[in-house]
Amino acid sequence: AQSVSQHNHHVILSEAASLELGCNYSYGGTVNLFWYVQYPGQHLQLLLKYFSGDPLVKGIKGFEAEFIKSKFSFNLRKPSVQWSDTAEYFCAVIPVTGNQFYFGTGTSLTVIP
Amino acid sequence: GAVVSQHPSRVICKSGTSVKIECRSLDFQATTMFWYRQFPKQSLMLMATSNEGSKATYEQGVEKDKFLINHASLTLSTLTVTSAHPEDSSFYICSAKGTSSFYEQYFGPGTRLTVT
């Protein structure tokens, strides 16, 4: 069965620190990959997505993610976090042959000013 | 663009009653809408997929008679929790798939249901 793992459940960083959130998926076929962010009290918003091409994708607010096919990974990075990045981050995968998103369990990021 | 709304944002109901949650795509037509349930500190779990004008497809383990889904138009899908029980208390989120990108979904803000 398809699954998405986010190994960091809760991350606490100081402002200006670098961020990397892990995401691994298990699926034998081709997938499209997404990172969503949920700010406190708000709905899910798309941060970035990967469909094909350059495996290093840039999203909004300075976030980027790298797809490493051999490792089934799609880690999210940001070189310097801000207090406003405090939120819940979800990795999601959708097989190209399917219609259904598979979400990771989410990572709660707290940035301390 | 691509805004999805949900109503109500919060609802408290008594055990045994039914609750209807609406999901609307405000500025685009959504042929497919999805309903998710999110437990505290956990991921979103897909409950069902609804296509306009046809019956919803439920995920394994989701009771279709308890969670009634209707997708009567290209901009509206409803989820009715029938005979609600405290264990149905959760955060329900809908998403809608637009026509511009096959894989992108736009999420509503969610509805917090509390059954007392």
Image: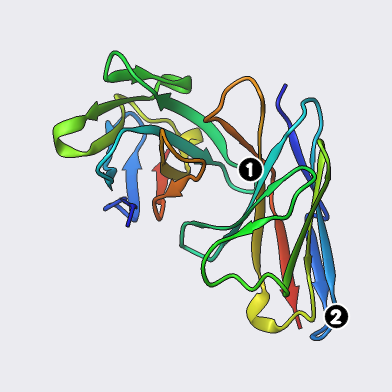
Q: Which mark is residue B70?
A: none
Q: Which amino acid, by three-letter code, is at mark 1? A: His
* Whether residue B86 is situated above or below residue A82 in the rendered picture: below
Lateral position of residue B34 relative to residue B70, left or right: left
Residue B57: x percent and y percent?
63, 56
Tag nearer the camera, 2 or 1: 2
Seen as rendered, the residue at the extreme front is: B54
x 63%, y 43%: residue: A43
Q: Are marks 2 and 1 on the same chain?
A: no
Color encoding of the figure: rainbow
Residues at marks 2 and 1, CA–CA distance in whole angstroms = 27 Å
Q: Position of residue A40 (x, y in %)?
A: 59, 47
Q: Please give the count of numbered marks on the rendered protein.
A: 2
User: Left or right: where does residue B86 sit relative to residue A56?
Assistant: right
Residue B17 shows which numbered tag?
A: 2
Label 2 neighbourhood size at 10 Å, few (<14), some (14-19), many (20+)? Answer: few
Q: Indicate the amino acid at tag 2.
A: Thr
Q: Quadrant of the C terminus of chain B?
A: bottom right
Residue at 32 percent of width and 42 percent of height:
A13
Q: Residue at x 51, y 41 (%)?
A: A99
Kindly identify which residue carries mark 1.
A43
Q: Image quadrant for the N terminus of chain B?
A: top right
Q: Are marks 2 and 1 in contact (CB under 8 Å)?
A: no
**Vertical position of residue A110 compared to residue B87: above or below:** above
Q: Return the chain for callout 2.
A: B
